[in-house]
Image (spheres, grey):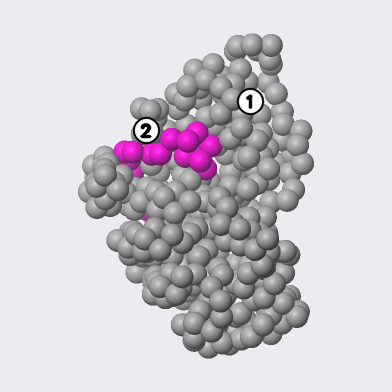
Amino acid sequence: MADPITVVLATHAGAAHVTAYLDALAAAEDCNAVVLADPDGAWAEEARKRLGTKLKSVEADPAAAFAGQRAGMGLVTMEARRAPAVIETALEANWHVFAEKPACVQIEDFRKLVDLADRKHRYLMLALANRTNPEIAAARRLFASGHIGRLFGVEAHLIADQTRLTRPEYHRSWFADRTRAGGGHLIWLGIHWLDLTMYITGQPIRRVAGFTANVGGQPVRIEDSAAAALQYESGALGTLVSAYYLDKGYHQYIKLWGEHGWLMIRPMTDDPLRWYTSRGPEAGVVHSWKGNREPRGYTPFVRAAVRACRFDSEPPISNADSLRALETVFAIYRAAETGRAVDVMTATGRTQGR
């Protein structure tokens, strides 16, 4: 059996979800040591508190951290503009990489990293952690079973709070500047829903049209609202609204319309998954999924990633799926800029043969 692996957590002050990642690594049985690479020294105390004896050392230089021990998994959560260089360093040192989204500010940078990872037979996993939520796994099984038949259409929205955009500290953060973050709500939150619609159905989005705007008028240099029309590989059509509109909390919804029924996902509710079919012994009845809604979030997704790196088994998200999610986001940005519908791969510079 393969030995438990070391994880290098490469981060800095102001990075996203660091405490969630520390907790996830503390719970990951397939990781027996964590090296914190933090040039700002912002997370050392928190790492000691949450990791205990699992924290092996604290380094200022990520390159030194990756060079200092046997290759395992690099967990990179950094400002999007800073992330590609550190991911490249990890891959060149033959480490697998788990990267907090978006991990780039232009798609060309991430594509180069995926090319490098593929050549080195390493994983480059984007942190699209909703994939391992129990209702998503159940929805994927239901769709694959043919309960709703051939995909006809998709409706999705992911709405978060506008309140965060009113805070001066947010205005000063990298999240509020497209040149540092790559974009706004769509690349930070909407990307999850784009990925889930492709993951559940097994169909990539091939063509998009869309709009982006700062409808709230806050002093931020990102979109707070995006609306996109989507065409999937089979020809099925979909829509996505991705925005900061609420005073607090989230409003989340995905509905898949099929030839023989429908499937509806509403995470973080008491009824997270419902479906209907017009065929077979279950015809004509609206069904509610009664499974356990836990575990969910970053801990099970990180654990799955660490385990895949330890045993060279299937990761929770592939290199190709990580790239396709980002390609779809940047294609929507391109469509919004040009006012035209665009092919996802053409808009982001990829050829069909890749």
Residue drawn where x is 35% and y is 51% of the image: 327
- Number of the label disc, if any, that sits on residue 62: none
Image quarter (top left, top right, bottom left or bottom right) of the N terminus: bottom right
Q: Which residues are magenta?
A: 196-214
User: In the picture shown, does residue 153 fall above or below 162?
Assistant: above
**First along the sequence among labels 2 and 1:** 2
Label 1 packing within 10 angstroms: few (<14), some (14-19), many (20+): many
User: In the picture shown, does residue 25 fall above or below 275?
Assistant: below
Q: Tell me the residue that label 1 is attached to.
A: 275
Question: Where is residue 302 drawn, in percent x and y?
Answer: 62, 60
The amino acid type found where label 1 is placed reads Trp
User: In the picture shown, does residue 267 fall above or below 60?
Assistant: above
Residue situated in front as seen by the camera: 214 or 141: 141
User: In the picture shown, does residue 137 fall above or below 30?
Assistant: above
Please tell me whether mark 2 or mark 1 is closer to you in this view: 2
Question: Is 6 left, or right, of 68 in this rendering?
Answer: right
Residue drawn where x is 31% and y is 44% of the image: 344
Q: Tell me the residue that label 2 is attached to.
A: 233
Residue situated in front as seen by the camera: 264 or 222: 264
Residue drawn where x is 64% and y is 11% of the image: 280
Can residue 39 be seen by looking at this rendering? no
In reply to whether residue 156 is colored magenta, the answer given is: no
Distance CA(mark 2)–CA(mark 1) = 23 Å
The amino acid type found where label 2 is placed reads Glu
> Under tag 1, what secondary structure?
strand
Question: Where is residue 278 drawn, in percent x and y?
Answer: 60, 13
Question: Where is residue 189 drawn, in percent x and y?
Answer: 51, 54
Residue drawn where x is 62% and y is 73% of the image: 6
Label 2 packing within 10 angstroms: few (<14), some (14-19), many (20+): some
Question: Where is residue 338 drawn, in percent x and y?
Answer: 22, 48
Can residue 199 be seen by looking at this rendering? yes
